[in-house]
Image: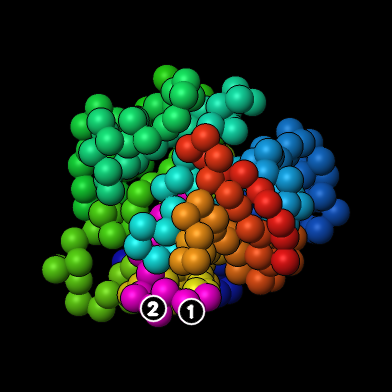
């Protein structure tokens, strides 16, 4: 179909009144003021909350770190603390079998939801399960462990660009469905004594470029139960490169100090 001429569109759109019509900044402010107030959900990890001012719907949070560094433990700590506030999380635990994942929670199991069976390499399936979680349980948080289970790496022609498309899809989902998505990502192999950064996330720089926050976690190789969490960047608060020391206490993380 041939596009309409500009002169024709000028006349036609001068009276356009659709939901996506162009409005003034004052009109937009009025629309925003009529919407429900966004109340951040706090992690109950004081220094982390200071860096992030909590988590709000529409955000995509990338979590990364070396292998066996505590990414899942960190996310399970968040899940437990959200559950204590009656905030339900939906978990896609591709990395760990359900039995092992459930058993890793210490003490009383927090309330969260998860698919009874997983399907990898399908963003359409993922979207449907998130919508199901919203409809049945009113979930507010979504944890995906991890990024590389959302696509077939062998079929990718340009890995970096196609991962960027996946990240944009997840960000769009977070906004569309009014949820917060936490995405675990693998990291390049580094010297165990090297402090990692969001630049070390595997396969695509788009993970950091398209996410609202990048959080890196790694273990202190000199100790048995200490780890570092670094908020590499947080677009909403403007925080950069803030490190927090954590201790593993009773199977979950507890803050020790901030640097």
The residue carrying pointer 2 sits among few (fewer than 14), some (14 to 19) or many (20 or more) residues within 10 Å by Cα, namely few
**Residue 76 position within the rendered picture, expressed as x and y whole percent measured from the top left:** 47, 39
Tell me what residue is drawn at x 28 percent, y 48 percent.
95
Left or right, 228 with respect to 101, comes to right
Left or right, 78 with respect to 122, comes to right
Q: Look at the image and tell me whether residue 35 can be seen.
A: no
* Marks 1,2: beta carbons within 8 A: yes
Tell me what residue is drawn at x 42 percent, y 32 percent.
105
Residues 137 and 255: in front is 255
Tell me what residue is drawn at x 20 percent, y 66 percent.
153
Q: Which residue is mark 2?
A: 190
* Label of residue 119 in the image: none
The residue carrying pointer 1 sits among few (fewer than 14), some (14 to 19) or many (20 or more) residues within 10 Å by Cα, namely few
Q: Quadrant of residue 11?
A: bottom right
Left or right, 254 with respect to 129, comes to right
Q: Quadrant of residue 37?
A: top right
**Residue 126 position within the rendered picture, expressed as x and y whole percent measured from the top left:** 32, 42
**Residue 174 position within the rendered picture, expressed as x and y whole percent measured from the top left:** 51, 47
Indicate the secondary structure of the residue bearing disc 1. Answer: loop
> Residue furthest toward the right?
26
**Most frequent secondary structure within the magenta stretch:** loop
Q: Which residues are magenta?
A: 182-195
- The C terminus - image quarter: bottom right
Q: Which residue is mark 1?
A: 194
Left or right, 8 with respect to 92, comes to right
Indicate the secondary structure of the residue bearing disc 2. Answer: loop
Q: Look at the image and tell me whether residue 189 can be seen.
A: yes
Tell me what residue is drawn at x 47 percent, y 77 percent.
193
- The N terminus - image quarter: bottom left
């Amino acid at each position: 179909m041939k596009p309409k001429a500009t002169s024709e569109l000028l006349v036609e759109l001068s009276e356009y009144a659709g939901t996506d019509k162009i409005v003034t900044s004052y009109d937009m402010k009025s629309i925003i003021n009529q919407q429900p107030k966004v109340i951040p959900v706090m992690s109950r990890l004081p220094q982390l909350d200071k860096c992030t001012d909590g988590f709000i719907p529409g955000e995509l949070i990338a979590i990364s770190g070396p292998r066996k560094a505590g990414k899942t433990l960190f996310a399970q700590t968040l899940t437990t603390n959200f559950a204590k506030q009656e905030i339900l999380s939906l978990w896609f635990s591709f990395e760990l079998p359900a039995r092992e994942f459930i058993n890793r929670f210490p003490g009383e199991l927090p309330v969260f939801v998860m698919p009874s069976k997983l399907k990898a390499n399908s963003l359409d399936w993922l979207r449907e399960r998130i919508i199901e979680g919203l409809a049945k349980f009113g979930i507010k948080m979504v944890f995906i462990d991890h990024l590389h289970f959302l696509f077939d790496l062998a079929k990718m022609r340009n890995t970096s660009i196609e991962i960027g498309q996946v990240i944009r899809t997840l960000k769009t989902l977070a906004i569309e469905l009014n949820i917060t998505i936490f995405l675990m990502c693998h990291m390049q192999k580094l010297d165990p004594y090297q402090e990692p950064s969001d630049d070390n996330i595997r396969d695509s720089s788009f993970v950091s470029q398209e996410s609202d926050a990048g959080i890196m976690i790694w273990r202190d190789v000199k100790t048995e139960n200490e780890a570092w969490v670094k908020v590499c960047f947080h677009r909403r608060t403007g925080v950069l490169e803030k490190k927090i020391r954590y201790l593993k206490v009773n199977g979950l993380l507890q803050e020790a100090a901030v640097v």
